[in-house]
Image (cartoon, rainbow, N blue to C red):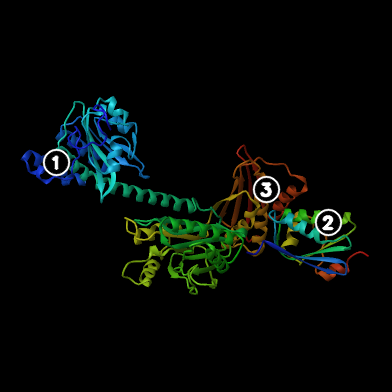
Amino acid sequence: MTPLADVRFETIDNVVVARLEGEVDMSNADDLGTAITARVSSDAIALVLDLAAVDYLDSAGIHVLFDLRERLTRRGQQIRLVLGPDSPVATALEYAGVQRTLGASPTVSDAIAGLDG
Amino acid sequence: VGTPDAQPLIPEPGHGQVFLGLGDQSLLEQSTRQLEHVYRLADPALSELALEPLLDELLARAREILDVDTAAILLLDDAGQELVARAAKGLEEEVERGVRIPVGGGFAGRIAAGRTPIYIADVDHAEILNPILREKGIRSLLGVPMLVEGAIVGVLHVGTVTPREFTNEDAALLQLAAAQAAPAIDRARLFDALDRERRSAVALQRSLLPDRLPDLAGIETAARYLPARDEVGGDWYDVIDLPVGSVGLAIGDVAGHGLRAAALMGQLRTGLRAYALEGHAPGETLKRLDRLLQTISGRGMATAGYAVVDPATGALRYAGAGHPPPVIVREGERALLMKGRPAPPLGSLPFPAYHDVHDALEPGDTILLYTDGLIERRREPLTAGLERLRELAAAPRSPEQLCQHVIERLVPATGGDDDIAVVALRIRPVQDAMRIRFAADPQVLSQMRRTVGRWLQAHGAEPKEVAAITLACGEACANAIEHAYAPGVASFELEADHDDGVVTLAVRDTGRWRAARGTNRGRGLKMIAAAVDELDVRTTSAGTEVVIRHRLGAS
């Protein structure tokens, strides 16, 4: 049985790229957050979270995005989101009024290119 | 065995006690009175009676004919070690107190051990174990064994409160009564034993089947199990609430009957359920179940079918193991037999292959799984039974009605030769209004989204509207789930209605409203408000209701 969401990891030049697909809600958001945090080693400079293939994200998912941002920032690491325009996640962030706060890039390479330092 | 006062326990004839031979024909021809006695004790009408009235009537007649004060029957217990008082006239206490006499001991015990009649002229001078005989002041006793095909089943004895010399004729009459009662007792015991086994097998069978089906959103299910007329069988069904909103539908039939089949059925049902919950596809589930069956000692064989249905998309996967094909009823119009790849029964061949076949159910479509007891008739090819079922199934009915209908039409009222299991699942037809109860568990959210999404689509919502309203509804449901902190099985209700282009979704729980916890919950409400036209939160003493309203096609 396919789980609600799946995440795949890749490391490009010390940047951890996590590609999330499926649906994120109250039932799996915390577990996904924990799984992603565990894969970002202390020597990584940033996490690029690709949400382009996510079909659904609710407030529990948004909470996890903020939580990830807070943890990584504390460790001196950067976080960038990747969102397709008009994607379900972009719409959800807009409803929550946090799209500007979280920021997003249209592609993974744009996100990496836009990293500080 | 020496002093003049203490008579030998089993004396020689002529010492006041007599040994009586079995059936002295000459005695029975002496007079019409005797003939009448014989007739009354050997009355064929007696054998028509049930055991209790038969014993009662026989004892009454024996007491009257032999002119005695008491008459009693003791039966050998199951272990064959003791005689237990079973029926009595004038000695009712014997039964009430459940008098038990060891075989070989006392008056009745020696009759049973020796399979021979005994007459005691004077109780005072004999070894009597039964205290009631003395309490009642019994003086003389005559007892005969009750035999069935040479085996002892009990003892019949009569007694008098005044000294009485029983004759060989008396003994012959008593033996006649014993001969009348013995087979009836034996028969009744056999029925008792069979009935006990059947009752416990049926109880076991029932306990191994689901006691109620899960209540799942977006679908309706129903099932029936009918034991065979004479014997318990090994049929089973199951409805499995799978992770991620899918539903498993299982059916199976263990070869053979009786307790063994029922017990194996229990193992296979649990095995299938366990593999299904691990998320395996139907074919893989059956393959694993086959391997499990191969490890069960004295391994039997079974046919089985397993279907996985996604209520949101209608996607259907099915695999069968030597099992008759499922019937699919297309929204009440026509019914067809699902085509599958032929595959051997579980436990019949080494390394069998079970493949999935794919199909789809539309809203209102039904899938029916059943065991062969439903379609099999003697002297008739199986295809005829399949065709009859297919024709019967083709009409709009709920799963409950469908199960009832096919059973009423295909199974005789007295029960079938074989046991029967049926289980049906229907994708709920889209209704104008729907009301669904969900468990207060985050796992139900994805299922809720699919159900609401399909409902919105059916009422003409555009994909963007579907996404927005579903998100709003998801937040309202998450709220309800967070409220469910009371002990016990908590649930919430979702009601959706559609009126003149406006959809209204109400989510009701029985918890008290919690103030926004951090930014998270507050964010959920903010998202609802942004996603739809109207949001209304009502808190009453009964619980909280979140109402969402949105006009379709406005943007």
Q: In the picture provided, is A65 more to the left or to the right than B143?
A: right
Neighbour class for label 3 at 10 Å: few (<14), some, many (≥20)? many
Label 3, label 2: how many angstroms apart (C-alpha)? 24 Å
Whether callout 1 and callout 3 share a subunit is answered: yes
Q: Which residue is mark 1?
A: B40
* Residue at screen point 16% across, 47% down: B44
Q: Quadrant of residue B283?
A: bottom right
Q: Which residue is mark 2?
A: A69
Label 1, label 3: how many angstroms apart (C-alpha)? 83 Å
Amino acid tagged 2:
Arg
* Residue at screen point 55% across, 55% down: B216
Neighbour class for label 1 at 10 Å: few (<14), some, many (≥20)? some
Q: Which residue is mark 3?
A: B479
| Total number of numbered discs in the rendering | 3
Amino acid tagged 1:
Arg
Label 2: chain letter:
A
Q: Percent from the top left, x then y, of residue B136?
A: 26, 25
Q: Percent from the top left, x then y, of residue B207?
A: 47, 50
